[in-house]
Amino acid sequence: MDINTSYRTITREQFLFHEMRIVARLIKEGKSDEQIIQEVTDNNLFQYPTERMIKNITQVCLNRFNKANSHEWIDIVANDSADAAKQACLFLMMNYYRLVWEFMITVIGEKYRTKDTNVIKLRNGIF
């Protein structure tokens, strides 16, 4: 993360694991961003209710991959285990949104550094 990166608006962004996995697989097939948006929209691969929402989320996924500029991250999300792919998606989200990066480094990182196990409790365990 470049410290000079400005903050992007992050109002309703989601983790988008399944969407990122679909987009990664389409990137691996050699499709362009435009072709990916078209295929996801035409086939409603995300199963979203509106075309506008599908295009928007597809672009968000592409932006995260494009910011990282690494085929390795794409390969991990597309082909590795769900756990490895989720970690890659977290990194890609951190890499794209400075606020997420700073939260993970300052808050969560400090919890791990101090071995504070009372991190953040979610529905299915600890974050």
Image (spheres, rainbow, N blue to C red):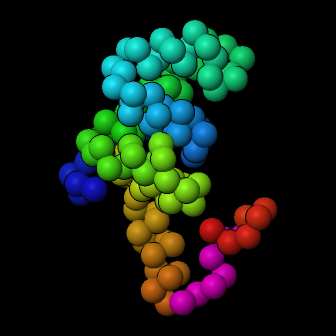
The residue at 57%/60% (across/down) is 83
Of 15 and 45, the residue lying toward us: 45
Asked if 115 appears above or below 108 in the picture, the reply is below
Position of residue 22 measured from the top left corner of the image (x, y, whole percent): 54, 33
Q: Quadrant of the C terminus?
A: bottom right
Q: Quadrant of the N terminus?
A: bottom left
- Whether residue 50 sits left or right of residue 72 in the image: it is right
Q: Which residue of the protein is positioned furthest toward the bottom in this rendering?
A: 114
Q: What is the span of residues highlighted in magenta in the rendered image?
A: 115-121
Most common secondary structure along the magenta stretch: loop
Asked if 84 appears above or below 60 in the picture, the reply is below
The residue at 26%/42% (across/down) is 69
Position of residue 123 measured from the top left corner of the image (x, y, whole percent): 78, 62
Taking the image as drawn, is residue 16 in sight? no
Q: How many marks?
A: 0
- Whether residue 50 sits left or right of residue 21 in the image: it is right
For residue 120: magenta?
yes
The residue at 51%/72% (across/down) is 108
For residue 5: magenta?
no
Of 69 and 72, the residue lying toward us: 72
Q: Which residue of the protein is positioned furthest toward the right in this rendering?
A: 123
- Whether residue 23 sits left or right of residue 63 in the image: it is right
Residue 64 appears in which quarter of the rendering? top left
The residue at 46%/65% (across/down) is 104
- Whether residue 109 sits left or right of residue 14 in the image: it is left
Position of residue 50 measured from the top left corner of the image (x, y, whole percent): 66, 14
Taking the image as drawn, is residue 111 in sight? yes
